[in-house]
Amino acid sequence: MSPLIELNNISKLFVTEEIETRAVNQVNLSINKGEYVALSGPSGCGKSTLLSMMGLLDTATTGSYELAGVNVSQLNANQRAAIRNKKIGFIFQSFNLISDLSVFENIMLPLTYQKGLDKNQIQQQVNQVLAKVEMGHRKNHFPSQLSGGQQQRVAVARALVNSPDFILADEPTGNLDSKNALAVMNLLEELHQDGSTICMVTHDPQSALRARRQVEMFDGQIISDSINSLSVKAKVDSSTSQVSIA
């Protein structure tokens, strides 16, 4: 079976006036279906740029990218957008919710680009992911009426609603306090246990340890790629102190 994600000698150059910056430098990376990968490294090392290319939000300067066995390196913007909507779920540090849409409408948004779904199917899929992230009671609220942790739960639901092949999370706990960060990490772990493929960019060593596989970058290159057989299981037990997003 071929990897779900396969990057071959991927590089990304940014050119400004006479300055050339190689943000990602000849990276080779394969991710199999069902893996949970943490991509870490110092600020400016290229990890978010790499994640953007994996999510087809950006294109590589050189190299090739195969997604589910299909070379997606030379697709145009419309073709990339169509694949993003069908195959990729995104979770961002800043949540990226639309302020004048309700929780339900924010989560529903990716489904409006899919053909063949009627109103009942859309409502069913949105309600299912709302239940998964325990936000059904807030579906008619607006982002400004939610805490940061609740907004991130809505963002996770939006990432899941189109049943993507994999989830890309860029610093998903970066704007959260420690309690809500732990709750979001627990949720990601539950999604992985349910079969989701996850690649997460993080600067937090404890968050990285939650993943089964750790990939570390420095100066645009991968410097280590290891399996963590003792990945942290930091989910808070209800018999001690229950963590929830308020």
Image (cartoon, rainbow, N blue to C red):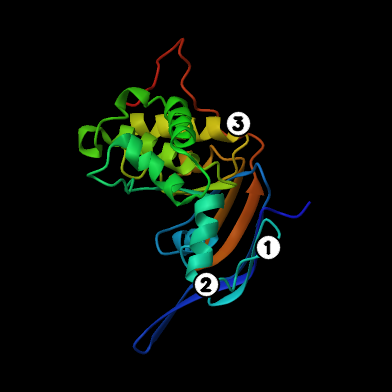
Q: Pointer 2: residues within 10 angstroms few (<14), some, or many (20+)? A: few
Q: Secondary structure at mark 3?
A: loop
Do labels 1 and 3 touch, CB within 8 Å?
no
Residue 58, percent across and down? 47, 67
Query: Where does the image place residue 32, in percent across and percent down from the top left?
Result: 68, 49
Q: Residue furthest right?
A: 1
Report the front residue among 199 and 125. 125
Numbered mark located on residue 194 in the image: 3
Measured Cα–Cα span from mark 1 to mark 2: 14 Å
Q: Nearer the viewer, mark 1 or mark 3?
A: 1
Relative vertical location of residue 43 with respect to residue 208 in this rendering, above or below = below
- Asked whether the residues under the numbered discs 2 and 3 touch, taking CB atoms below 8 Å apart as contact, a structural biologist would say no
Q: How many marks?
A: 3
Residue located farthest toward the bottom when viewing the structure as drawn: 18
Q: Secondary structure at mark 1?
A: strand
In the image, is 178 to the left or to the right of 87?
Answer: left
| Type of amino acid at the residue the image marks with label 1 | Val
**Can the viewer see residue 39 in this picture?**
no
Query: Quick check: can you spot residue 142?
Result: yes
Q: Nearer the viewer, residue 177 or 124?
A: 124
Q: Which mark is residue 76?
A: 2
Residue 230, quarter of the rendered image? top right
| Callout 2 amino acid | Asn
- Judged left or right of residue 72, residue 176 is left
Residue 188 place in picture, x, y as percent: 50, 35
The residue depicted at 48 percent of the width and 69 percent of the height is 77
Q: Which mark is residue 70?
A: 1
Q: Which mark sits nearer the N-terminus, 2 or 3?
A: 2
Classify mark 2: helix, strand or loop: loop
Q: In 3D space, how far apart are the residues under numbered discs 2 and 3 (Cα atoms)?
A: 33 Å
